[in-house]
Image (spheres, helix red, strand yellow):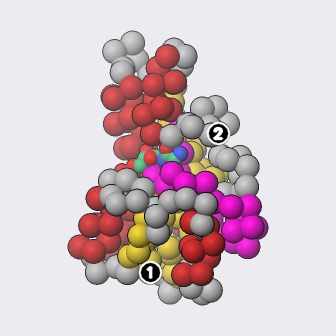
């Protein structure tokens, strides 16, 4: 049984999707062993609802060190599911190849510092992009720069707003995240 630690900062719908796809057998031979949040957020309630160990480590410069101390050594995969802190290079190095992040755009476009959540969708619509999508990638010390594991796009129409783009991106995330996790776990 592979152990997955999920890091969150927000509502945790992607965390919920991971929990559900494990329950449905779409992600096999794995369990969410721990959920870590860097702030109070609804995602923590989701962990509690499923009796998953959960901890809040307040965001700040000590976050990566404290996280490093509580992550079990037998962790197979660390999943960033709407997680907004930047992990320290030493942490990324220690867990190299075992950290994945989901990003709400088609990397390498619309990535990097400050590009998260609605900021991404605002920028995409502002730039009159013809398409957007979601990307799952390995995490390195370069923000949003690690190797791409899976990516899927959709066409943006004239009527789309940042809000509708966000909804469409979320649907794509729910589709590709479990697949990408299976891929990294070697399932
Ligand atoms: C997701 O769209 C995810 O791609 C994004 O935050 C959202 C979290 O939603 N992550 C980033 O912007 C990271 N740069 P959720 O809490 O409902 O899963």
Across and down, in percent, residue 49 comes to: 23, 73
Cβ(mark 2) to ligand 1 < 8 Å?
A: no
- Crowd tier of the residue under label 1, counting other residues whose Cα lies within 10 Å: few below 14, some 14–19, many 20 or above: some
Q: Is residue 90 above or below residue 102?
A: below
Circle 2 SS class: loop
Query: What residue lies at 67% left-to-right and 36% top-to-bottom?
Result: 108
Circle 1 SS class: strand
Q: Which of the pair 3/111 is nearer the observer?
A: 111
User: Would you identify the image quadrant in which residue 158 lies?
Assistant: top left
Across and down, in percent, residue 156 comes to: 44, 22
- Crowd tier of the residue under label 2, counting other residues whose Cα lies within 10 Å: few below 14, some 14–19, many 20 or above: few
Disc 1 to disc 2, C-alpha distance: 29 Å
> Is residue 156 in view from this perspective?
yes
**Mark number for residue 33?**
1
Cβ(mark 1) to ligand 1 < 8 Å?
A: no
Q: Which of the pair 61/119 is nearer the observer?
A: 61
Foreground label between 1 and 2 = 2
Which stretch did the figure color magenta?
81-105
Query: What residue lies at 49% left-to-right and 16% top-to-bottom?
Result: 126
Q: Is residue 73 above or below residue 124?
A: below
Q: The C terminus lies in which quarter of the figure?
A: bottom right
Residue 94, magenta (yes or no):
yes
Q: Is residue 146 left or right of residue 74?
A: right
**Mark number for residue 112?**
2
Residue 71, magenta (yes or no):
no
Across and down, in percent, residue 58 comes to: 46, 64
Q: Which of the pair 182/82 is nearer the observer?
A: 82
Q: Is residue 129 left or right of residue 147?
A: left
User: Would you identify the image quadrant in which residue 110 lies?
Assistant: top right
């Amino acid at each position: 049984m592979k152990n997955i630690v999920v890091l969150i900062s927000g509502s945790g719908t992607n965390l919920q999707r991971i929990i559900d796809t494990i329950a449905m057998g779409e992600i096999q031979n794995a369990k969410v062993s721990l959920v870590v949040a860097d702030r109070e957020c609804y995602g923590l309630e989701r962990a509690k609802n499923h009796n998953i160990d959960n901890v809040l480590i307040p965001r700040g410069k000590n976050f990566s060190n404290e996280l490093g101390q509580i992550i079990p050594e037998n962790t197979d995969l660390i999943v960033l599911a709407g997680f907004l802190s930047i992990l320290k290079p030493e942490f990324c190095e220690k867990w190299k190849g075992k950290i994945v992040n989901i990003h709400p755009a088609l990397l390498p476009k619309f990535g990097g510092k400050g590009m998260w959540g609605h900021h991404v969708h605002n920028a995409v619509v502002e730039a009159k992009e013809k398409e957007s999508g979601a990307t799952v990638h390995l995490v390195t010390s370069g923000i949003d720069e690690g190797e791409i594991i899976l990516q899927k796009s959709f066409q943006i129409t004239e009527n789309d707003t940042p809000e509708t783009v966000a909804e469409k991106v979320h649907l794509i995330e729910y589709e590709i995240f479990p697949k990408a996790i299976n891929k990294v776990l070697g399932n």
